[in-house]
Image (spheres, helix red, strand yellow):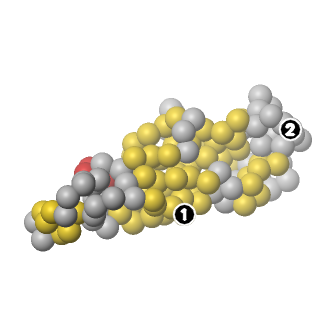
Amino acid sequence: MHFKNLRSPFSFKIKHGGSVPGSPVNTVAPSILRLGNSIICNKGNWIGTDPITYSYVFVRSFDGVTYDVVQSSLSDTYDLSSEDNLSWIRCNVLGSNGISPNGSADSNILTIDGLLYTLDFQNKFNSGYKILTY
């Protein structure tokens, strides 16, 4: 497993079987999906001594290589903005329970296709794209 502290440029690896008993370990990777203008991050499955708390770090890339943090919180939801157009979004889930080391796992990557929909109560057309009416 590879762990990265987002507040530090350093990272370290823990070999399989080398984690501390009871520390959070991800057993099924997190996944993200898009619902309208929101990205929802499912934390996946975790084992370890309860209670495990989860935090979510949403990162964005425009080149598919370098990812920048766009939101870090206890919320599993990220609201898209126009700045996310034509980018890739991924979620990193951090599981912690007071037993070191914390567990960390990355989700799949979503491509944001540039067609962000806005809520509007009229049928309008903007730059050739139909704005969805809810």
User: Which residue is painted at 69% across and 41% down in the image?
Assistant: 95
- Quadrant housing residue 64: bottom left
Whether residue 43 sits left or right of residue 10 in the image: it is right
Is residue 70 in view? yes
Instruction: Give the side of residue 128 with respect to residue 86, left or right.
Output: left
Q: Quadrant of the C terminus?
A: bottom left
In what element is the residue under mark 2? loop
The local secondary structure at tag 1 comes to strand
Return the x and y of residue 62 as percentages of the image width and height: 32, 59
**C-alpha distance separating marks 1 and 2:** 26 Å
Q: Which residue is mark 1?
A: 108
> Which of the pair 10/103 is nearer the observer?
103
Q: Is residue 110 above or below residue 72?
A: below
Outermost residue toward the front in this view: 122
Callout 2: few (<14), some (14-19), or many (20+) C-alpha neighbours within 10 Å? Answer: some
| Residue annotated with mark 2 | 49
x and y percent of residue 10 in the render?
55, 39
Location of residue 121 by image quarter: bottom left
**Could you tell me which residue is drawn at 56 percent across and 52 percent down?**
41
Looking at the image, which residue is at 77% across and 50% down?
A: 46
Q: Nearer the viewer, residue 67 or 84?
A: 84
